[in-house]
Amino acid sequence: MNLPHSVAERAQDHVNNDRLQAAIAALARFGGRDDGGVARETLTEIDLASRRHLIDLARALGCEVSIDDCANLFFRRRGSTDLPPVLTGSHGDTQPVGGKLDGAYGVLAGLEVIAALNDAGITTLRPIDVVAWTNEEGSRFGPGAMGSSAYVEPARLAQYRESLDRNQISFGSALDAALAAVADVPRRPMQQPMAACVELHIEQGPVLERASVPLGVVTGIQAVRWFEVTCTGMAAHAGTTPMDERADAMAAAVGIAQRLYSLAAREATSQLRLTLGRWQVGPNSINTIPGKVTFSVDVRCVDDAVLARFEHTLRTMTQAADWRGSMTVACIFQRAPTLFPDGMLRLIEQACTRASQSPPLRLTSGAFHDAMYLAEHCPTAMIFVPSKGGISHNAAEETAPHELLLGVQALAYTVAALANQ
Amino acid sequence: MNLPHSVAERAQDHVNNDRLQAAIAALARFGGRDDGGVARETLTEIDLASRRHLIDLARALGCEVSIDDCANLFFRRRGSTDLPPVLTGSHGDTQPVGGKLDGAYGVLAGLEVIAALNDAGITTLRPIDVVAWTNEEGSRFGPGAMGSSAYVEPARLAQYRESLDRNQISFGSALDAALAAVADVPRRPMQQPMAACVELHIEQGPVLERASVPLGVVTGIQAVRWFEVTCTGMAAHAGTTPMDERADAMAAAVGIAQRLYSLAAREATSQLRLTLGRWQVGPNSINTIPGKVTFSVDVRCVDDAVLARFEHTLRTMTQAADWRGSMTVACIFQRAPTLFPDGMLRLIEQACTRASQSPPLRLTSGAFHDAMYLAEHCPTAMIFVPSKGGISHNAAEETAPHELLLGVQALAYTVAALANQ
């Protein structure tokens, strides 16, 4: 790649910290809570108001605003050509109680890059699109990352429209209302070609903080497999049933769970991550032997082969379980690892090094992001900034202001460079 | 003891199988279900209707009916003296879905004993009281065995009255309505002296069936201790949090649970029974590391010293737990073993042997019964008949009719003998 670095450097140098921090504070008022958290689930009244706020911000920066059938919002800064654009941005929705940075930071960073290019008087070769994806969190309507996954494969949208929230409102009807609320914004097709995509996000984990490095180059996203293990025994009286006559579903489940934790400990070097997060116990009474226990297995690794080996062991283990009941394993979700292309990583590494005057850390993302789906569509990569204590999806989510600034500076360099290729 | 065995034998021989089976079927219609189960929770409309049915039955047998402040119903057959009575009976309420025998069998058996004494033309020295205790099950209002425990210690009633059901109705208001519904029945004081108490009940466990013995002499009721173990870690993202930075409350809980199950296996010879029945997991989400797990420990044994040793090990184990979170153990209930007096056991053994033409089995009760509280008040014991498959608290609860008959025959002998001492 022959990079026009002087333009990228000028863009980076024009990022304005005060404007960035003010923009983050302003968006956080949409759904802001007394504890510093933000409650802005997708397509709620609060989310729609925040979208109007973003549209106004983007238009004030001279952007053309458009929206697609999944209510993904696009803010375009024109280039000197109509070549496929460079995409940046993230999502504007939060968990039921989230922080002010998860998602919002990436969207506002994109708008700050545009402001910086404006200030620097730069016209890029390619257009730059800043996107605010719909429903990344997946907390109101499942699954998550609806907007980005529908963008790269629009056939997904029909099924997403049927998804219901806890009040039995469908995603489809919420979507139609959201689109009707911005009737002044022209519709644009999905699945349009992109030159590249860069997403800036908080890490949501402790790796950067632990290493005392302010910027991370994300090399990819872990593979994941989700299972549900169901142990079916016989509910019976805790006092009257002798131990050797029991079909205790909890004793069986605990036995398997303990062996899975041991297995994960033995896989420490492969960085396998194991979480048994959701448990359903029936009848769940102090003095009744559990008759049925179901627990979830969330297992992740950069190396899909490690997960395949884990799954094999899990299935062998449950089939061989020696007790009076039965045990089943169902795979309920599975995704191969996402590996971002090396050229993108090297460009981001340059951008980060210049911003922070030190080399960034290479790390993988343990969480899913919209970039995971964009990687199926165009060369994609991500930049991380630290999360204090590794905390996210929580009102206590926080990143130091100077680290937020460094992240946007790295993004500005990267986007400007890509937009001139 | 100098027992008037000829009277006891005549009482036993006058037990009428057809009348007994008909009485069981008639009471089972109050709350009867299509699947053969009975839904007659305490002090519901159905339970009040069944109480009226029992009152009518008892009056037809010539009994004097009375009720106490906890709505325990007493049916008295007069003796030739006013010496303290012999008490028999059980409870009329069921679990949300129970069978037709648990409790009901003991009450109807008592009435059948009175009918047999009538048929035999026997007048006993002491009165005989048949009781239907209020709220033995504890499923609608906690705790269980309210009626019998309040009878032996009336001060308990004030607190029981505050107990709320799932519709926020207090036990006190349900009690007042039940008492008002039988305004024709005279009130009697609680805590009155009793000469002895015998309760006939289904085993609710598999021991008699396994031994192919139709009658059991219950030597006592197991000691029990209930604990709540709470593991407090830190909820965090399943994807982004490295294994060595986790404070995974479920991993900690599973580790302790596995060690408790192993401990119980090593105590097999002491017949310790361990149930980890109730689990609460927060936030209980597939992709979030559990931040808090609470589980119940129900541990029972005939030998209280074994439970003391178990508790010591549990506390040591949790204090020594090596992880990033904290762990607490709270004892939420504890009861020493109940040992029935040897004289009562020998009498019941004679009664059972004559009824079934073979020696009964001595066994301990794993379940609580009203007799557990009566044992604090007067010489008490219990007779068990088998439960098919050990099943109870279930529509499938069943005992063979000839075994039900043998149980009442043994009870008639015992009660008649005691009432002539």
Image (spheres, coloured by chain):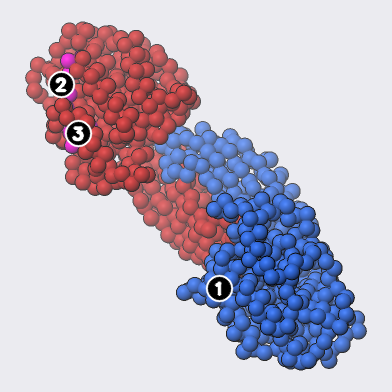
Chain colours: A blue, B red
Callout 1 amino acid: Phe
Mark nearer the viewer, 1 or 3: 1
Residue drawn where x is 49% and y is 56% of the image = B293
Residue B179 versus residue B228 in the image, above or below:
above
Both marks 2 and 1 on one chain: no
Residue A81: give x, y in percent of width and height.
88, 80
Identity, as a three-letter code, of the amino acid under mark 3: Ala
Q: Verify CB contact (< 8 Å) between mark 2 and mark 3.
A: no
Question: Residue at coordinates 67% horizontally, 75% vertically from top-left?
Answer: A55
Disc number placed over residue B180 in the picture, else none: 3
**Quarter that holds the N terminus of chain B:** top left
Above or below: residue A123 compared with residue B8: below
What amino acid type should be assigned to the residue bearing mark 2? Glu
The disc label shown at residue B64, or none: 2
Residue B300 lies left or right of residue B180; in this view the side is right
Q: Secondary structure at mark 1?
A: loop
Q: Position of residue A209 (x, y in %)?
A: 63, 78
Task: State the residue in front, B28 or A226.
Answer: B28
Quarter of the figure with the C terminus of chain B: top left
Residue A312 in view: yes
Task: Answer with the quarter of the image where residue B370 lies.
Answer: top left
- Measured from the top left, where is residue A379 in percent x and y? 83, 71
Mark 2 or 3: in front is 3
Disc 2 sits on a residue from what chain? B
In depth, the one of B139 and B208 nearer the eye is: B139
B71 in magenta:
yes
Badge 2 and badge 3 both on one subunit: yes
Q: Chain of mark 3?
A: B
- Specify the segment rendered in magenta: B61-72
Tell me the CA gap for discs 2 and 1.
73 Å
Residue ID for mark 1: A30
Q: Does B253 lie within the magenta span?
A: no
